[in-house]
Image (tube, rainbow, N blue to C red):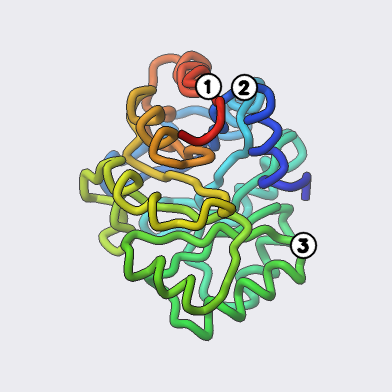
Amino acid sequence: MYGSLVENIRLRQREGFLPVLSEIKVRSPKEGDLLRGRDPTLLAEIMCKCQIAGLSVVTEFDNFGGDLDLIETLRPDVKVPILCKDFHKEVNDLKLAANVGADAVLLTVSMLNDEQIILLHETANSLGLETLLEIHSLAQLQRIIKLGIKPDILGINNRNILVFETDDGDVSLTEELASHIPSETLLLSESSIKCPKDARRARDAGADAVLVGTSILVANDTVKAINELLNVGWNGKS
């Protein structure tokens, strides 16, 4: 483990950057191969030389080609918090993520019942892991509020993970849902952020940070793509 993703997001805000989580993802059902012959360790090092707030590592295998070994391989060279992005459903999934050096874990509300959400959130915190609770609708947000859970980070996935993000999605979902989220909640806008304009829309809607995977991975210049997002800047929520 490296440290707190929440604290790193706040640090980037204080530095005047829009906090960005970039991503290592082997492939996607929509875009196919995303590494394109690149060494993931070297790619992660390039990303970390930018002022990213954290690194998301997709470890789900069937649809995205990842595994936990990827985090274990990257951990020694990644000097920012790592988010383990998988369909975590069991307590043991979280223990395995912690064991390979993850700092935070994804919990996908649409794939979990209420009891699982409570158990996994509490277990993650007991293991020293921060939680990213991910929603895709107002009904899912209302479930979280009703359960009384206060995640470390609340994520709005602008794409539908139930179809493995093969839909186009749009940052307008963040714009639609952000106003319903308590102001003290740290909000992350995920997916369908293709350019600085999209990132600016997410920030202006109320997002504290953005998670950008595919558009950075397919960019001709990784550093330029990240820096353009960072330079959207931060001057507080609108």
Vertical order, 186 against 38 (above or below): below
Q: Residue at label 3?
A: 128
Q: Amino acid at mark 1?
A: Gly
Relative to 83, is 48 above or below? Answer: above
Q: Quadrant for the C terminus, please.
A: top left
Name the residue: 48% across, 14% down.
224
Look at label 3 and name its amino acid. Gly
Q: Of label 1 and label 3, which has the lower sequence position?
A: 3
Say which residue appears at 42% left-offset and 45% top-offset.
190
Q: Are marks 2 and 1 in contact (CB under 8 Å)?
A: yes
**Residue 207 drawn at (x, y percent):** 47, 41
Secondary structure of the residue carrying tag 2 is loop
Secondary structure, mark 1, is loop
> Residue 221 sits in which quadrant?
top left
N-terminal of the two: label 2 or label 1?
Answer: 2
Measured in 3D between alpha carbons, the distance from the residue under mark 1 to the one under mark 3, in whole angstroms, is: 30 Å
Q: Which mark is residue 16?
A: 2
Q: Are marks 1 and 3 in contact (CB under 8 Å)?
A: no
Q: Name which of mark 3 and mark 2 comes first in the sequence.
A: 2
Residue 110: image location, x then y, percent: 37, 70
CA distance for labels 2 and 1 = 6 Å
Q: Which mark is residue 233?
A: 1
Could you tell whether 90 is left or right of 145 in the image?
right
Q: State the residue lying farthest toward the bottom.
A: 115
Q: Is residue 213 left or right of residue 13?
A: left
Q: Is residue 143 above or below residue 86?
A: below
Location of residue 3 in the rendering, given as x and y in whole percent from the top left corner: 77, 46
Estimate the spatial distance between the alpha carbons at disc 3 and disc 2, rounded to whole Å. 28 Å
Neighbor class of circle 3 (other Cα within 10 Å; few <14, some 14-19, many 20+) is: some
Q: Amino acid at mark 2?
A: Gly
